Image (cartoon, grey):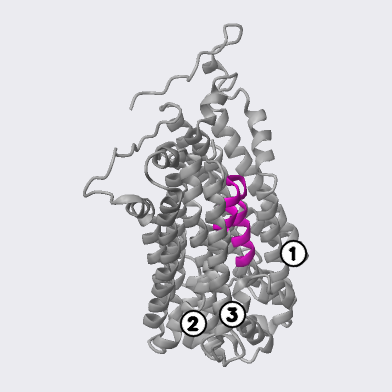
């Protein structure tokens, strides 16, 4: 690939653009902040609520130093729990909060960063907006700089939110954890910037960065499973492992020097992104796609949808199976970890029903798989929106292919894939637990109607308007937050009932109730049908 040239020549009255590579950066930053004025605050609100409410819940669960020391020792002695959330480095409320929420807050920061950076770099090029902007007085490095500045500003504010949420537990520890969360987000923002230069589409850039995030979680989990102190080599290979190794609120004091590791890696990745963007044209990439299938034929709209979504489905399938095996291995130790703490037991029972603790733990894990499957079905449904906004759908629909057949191909993958990953989660739980295979299968599959309802609402929002499609992610995120942290925060039942998952029977351990299953199934079908009707009647974007 040849080095990139300017898209258009600068006006003669101004210096050549090469001498002003950052011209227009401020304007692009303001534009990006305006476009993200809802997404960024919502993300910060979710993380802030999780840390603030979760810290209060931990303080209520373990009010004495002896109880906190006991739970810390129990968690550090259990390799499965260490692989899930890492080791505990102290017996204070702040140390428990850093252990319980630090890695997950870092994952949320990384997710926010990759979305922001790819949205304002590769996605702008893919839609043609970047070429239009670059035809004006815009420096070559301005788009990348603006995207990184927006992401880094968002991470800095997110770090301040985490710091403020934990400031009452000790300012030094709160600053350390806030800096670690912001640092993890900065690393993945820079990694997303590199992916945006290398790949050909926003979808691939997001997928590559999300895959790196998944690999980072697996490395940290593998390292922590093998060593309780966070010093395993695999843990140090992961930015999420660096987050825990800052040791916020740790008994031996914080490791401030780990924050320099975040800064150094971020700087190296940013330098790589700038080097790559200087060597390519707008809209080009270093990994070009092949013009057509390498083998075989695509048999209609369904075959095309499968070709486009099979990689994503494979990744989700492997993830659900592996997570099922890990969670299954934790089941027998659930009662020992909770012990005689009635408040901790109550949280598991609110998540998994009023059965005995082992069954409640299984039910809670199956419910968690259902909540995460809601993210899969939303992303798979909104692939329709991606095809439309990138103007790849219009040439196909201009021929004999009808909109319903085109949409049906993707919806079969979305809804059928949801059932598949839940089946694999059940298989993983059975492999890890070693018993109750039929009960676990029923507990996972009973989540499917609620998953389909979330997907049906995504179809409706997309069918109404392409601009409304992004709200489906907000719905999926709200449902996940209500199911994940709602029970720990002891939210009022009417608030929890906003989630379709709150109405499902808590299997195993409680009697099966078919009424909510059928109601949610009918609701999902109605929402999907209404969305398809609206899609058939409205104009395509662009």
Disc 1 to disc 2, how far (Cα)?
Answer: 42 Å
The front one of 360 and 374 is 374
Q: Could you classify mark 1 by the number of other residues whose Cα lies within 10 Å: few (under 14), some (14-19), or many (20 or more)?
A: some
290 over 335 or under it: above or below: above
SS under mark 3: helix
**Residue 443 disc label:** 2
Q: Could you classify mark 3 by the number of other residues whose Cα lies within 10 Å: few (under 14), some (14-19), or many (20 or more)?
A: some
Q: Main secondary structure of the magenta part?
A: helix
The reply to whether discs 1 and 3 touch (Cβ–Cβ < 8 Å) is no
Q: Nearer the viewer, mark 1 or mark 2?
A: 2
- Give x and y (percent) for residue 277: 46, 30
Residue at the extreme right: 168
Boundaries of the magenta span? 458-480
Task: Look at mark 1 in the image and give the residue it sits on.
Answer: 170
The reply to whether discs 1 and 2 touch (Cβ–Cβ < 8 Å) is no
382 sits left or right of 488 in the view: left
**Residue 449 disc label:** none
379 over 36 or under it: above or below: below
Disc 1 to disc 3, how far (Cα)?
Answer: 46 Å
């Amino acid at each position: 690939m040849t080095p990139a040239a300017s898209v258009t020549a600068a006006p003669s009255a101004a210096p050549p653009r090469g001498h002003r590579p950052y011209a227009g950066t401020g304007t692009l930053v303001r534009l990006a902040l305006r476009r993200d004025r809802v997404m960024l605050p919502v993300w910060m609100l979710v993380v802030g609520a999780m840390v603030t409410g979760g810290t209060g819940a931990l303080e209520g669960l373990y009010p004495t130093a002896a109880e906190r020391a006991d739970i810390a020792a129990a968690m550090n002695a259990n390799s499965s729990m260490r692989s899930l959330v890492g080791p505990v480095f102290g017996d204070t409320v702040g140390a428990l909060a850093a252990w319980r929420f630090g890695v997950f807050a870092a994952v949320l920061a990384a997710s926010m960063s990759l979305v922001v950076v790819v949205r304002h770099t590769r996605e702008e090029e893919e839609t043609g907006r970047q070429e239009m902007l670059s035809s004006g007085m815009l420096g070559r490095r301005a788009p990348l700089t603006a995207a990184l500045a927006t992401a880094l500003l968002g991470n800095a504010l997110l770090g301040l939110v985490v710091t403020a949420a934990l400031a009452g537990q000790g300012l030094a520890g709160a600053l350390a954890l806030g800096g670690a969360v912001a640092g993890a987000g900065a690393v993945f923002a820079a990694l997303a910037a590199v992916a945006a230069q290398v790949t050909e589409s926003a979808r691939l850039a997001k997928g590559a960065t999300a895959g790196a995030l998944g690999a980072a979680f697996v490395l940290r989990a593998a390292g922590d499973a093998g060593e309780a102190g966070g010093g395993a080599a695999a843990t140090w290979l992961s930015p999420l492992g660096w987050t825990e190794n800052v040791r916020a609120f740790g008994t031996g004091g914080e490791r401030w020097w780990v924050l320099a590791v975040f800064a150094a890696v971020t700087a190296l990745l940013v330098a790589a992104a700038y080097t790559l963007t200087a060597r390519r044209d707008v809209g080009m990439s270093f990994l070009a796609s092949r013009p057509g299938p390498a083998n075989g034929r695509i048999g209609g709209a369904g075959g095309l949808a499968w070709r486009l979504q099979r990689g994503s489905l494979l990744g989700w399938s492997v993830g659900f199976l592996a997570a099922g095996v890990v969670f299954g291995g934790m089941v027998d130790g659930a009662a020992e970890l909770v012990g005689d703490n009635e408040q901790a037991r109550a949280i598991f029972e609110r998540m998994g029903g009023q059965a005995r603790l082992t069954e409640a733990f299984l039910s809670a894990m199956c419910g968690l798989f259902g909540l995460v499957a809601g993210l899969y079905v939303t992303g798979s449904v909104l692939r329709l929106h991606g095809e439309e906004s990138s103007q790849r759908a219009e040439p196909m629909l201009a021929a004999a292919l009808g909109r319903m057949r085109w949409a049906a191909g993707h919806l079969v993958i979305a809804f059928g894939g949801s059932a598949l990953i839940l089946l694999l989660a059940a298989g993983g739980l059975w492999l890890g637990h070693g018993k109750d295979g039929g009960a676990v299968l029923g507990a996972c599959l009973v989540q499917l109607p609620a998953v389909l309802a979330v997907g049906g609402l995504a179809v409706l929002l997309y069918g109404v308007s392409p601009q409304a499609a992004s709200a489906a992610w907000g719905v999926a995120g709200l449902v996940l937050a209500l199911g994940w942290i709602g029970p720990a925060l002891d939210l009022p039942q009417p608030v929890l009932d906003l989630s379709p998952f709150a109405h499902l029977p808590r299997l195993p351990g409680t009697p099966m109730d078919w009424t909510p299953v059928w109601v949610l199934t009918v609701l999902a079908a109605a929402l999907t049908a209404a969305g398809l009707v609206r899609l058939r009647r409205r104009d395509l974007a662009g």
